[in-house]
Amino acid sequence: MDVILTMCSLVLLFIGSHVGLTLRPVRSRLAAALGEWGFLALYFAVAAASFTAATVYYADHRLDGPPGLALGDVAVLRPLLIFAAVAGVVAMAASFSSYPRSPYSLAGGSARREPRGFERVTRHPFFAGMALFATAHALLATHLIGTVLMLGLAALSIVGPWHQDRKLARLRGEGFTEYLRATSAVPFAAIAARRQVLAWRELPLGALAAGLAIAVGLRGVHEEIFAHRGAAVVAVTVGGAAVIALVSWLRTRRTAPPAGTPRGRVGSDITGSSARSSAARSSAAR
C-alpha cells in the first residue's frame, strides 16, 4: 500500500496547490508581491512541477500495487466507458475553439456574454471533458494506482471550475452572473432545462472531428502513452499550458492601451481600466 499512499499524496499535492494558490487571501498577497503575470508564472511553475511529479511516479509504478476495478472486463459496461472517454477527448478539443473569446480566457476574453457554439452544451468544455475522460479511466483501470490518479484529475475538473465561477462572479458582477445562469457546467443540463438550445450551425465541427481523431490516435498508442516515465504526457500537458499562457500574454501586450490613455477611452469591454488590469482580473480565477 506504500505505492497507493505515495500516489495519493502526490495527487493531493497537485490538487491542493492548484486550488490553494487561487484562494483569495493567498492569491492577493502573492499578486501584490509579484504582479499579476508574476503570480501566473509562479502558479504555472508549481502546477507543472506537481503534475510532473505525479505523472512520473505513476509511470514508474503503474503496474504495482493492488488491482483496480477493471470494469472494462464487464461486457455491458466496457462500450459505455469507452464512449465516455472518447466524448471527453472530443469535448476537450472543442474547448480550444471558443477559449480565446470566452470569459475564461487569460487575456480577458471579450465583452460577449451570450453563449454560442459548444458553450450552449457546457460552459466548461475542457473540464467537463476531463471529468468524463478521467472518471471513465478510473473505472477501467486494472490497477488501483491508476484509479487514484484518475479520480484526482476528475475531482480537480469538478472543484476547479466551481471555484473559478464563484471568483469570476464576484469580480465581474451581474454580467458574468447572467452568463452563468444561462449556461451549465454539466453537459446538456442547460439545454435540458430549456435555458439553451442546441444550435447545430454554431458547433465547431472541425474541432469536434479533430477530437475524435485524437481519441482514435490515443487508442492506437495506448500502451505507450506512459513510456519513458511519462515524458510524452508531461510534454504535451505542460507544453500546451505554456503555449496558451504565452499566447495570452502576447495578446494582452498587443491590446494594452498606450501609456497615458484616458480611462474612459480604453474600450467598451474594459471601461474604467486598462487592458492589462482587465486581464489581471480575469486571471484571478486561475
Image: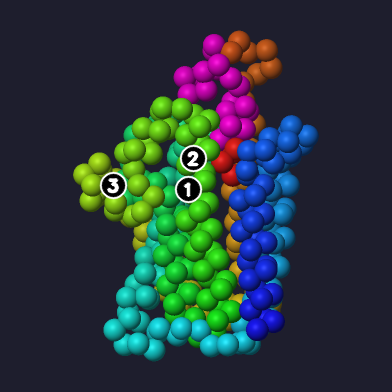
Mark 2 lies on residue: 166
Q: Is residue 46 above or below residue 57?
A: above
Considering depth in this image, is 102 or 164 the residue closer to the camera? 164
Where residue 68 appears, as percent x and y from the top left, is 51, 84
Q: Is residue 276 above or below residue 235?
A: above
* Circle nearer the viewer, 1 or 3: 1
Where residue 273 appears, as percent x and y from the top left, is 58, 20
Q: On the picture, is 68 further left or further right than 246?
A: left
Q: Is residue 237 magenta?
A: no
Q: Residue at x 67, y 61 (%)?
A: 13
Q: Is residue 197 above or below residue 279?
A: below
Q: Amino acid at mark 2?
A: Arg
Quarter residue 194 falls in? top left
Mark 1 crowdedness (10 Å alpha carbons): few <14, some 14-19, many ≥20: few
Q: Is residue 271 magenta?
A: yes
Considering depth in this image, is 85 or 203 the residue closer to the camera? 85
Mark 1 lies on residue: 162
Screen quadrant of the N terminus: bottom right
Where residue 145 appears, as percent x and y from the top left, is 59, 79
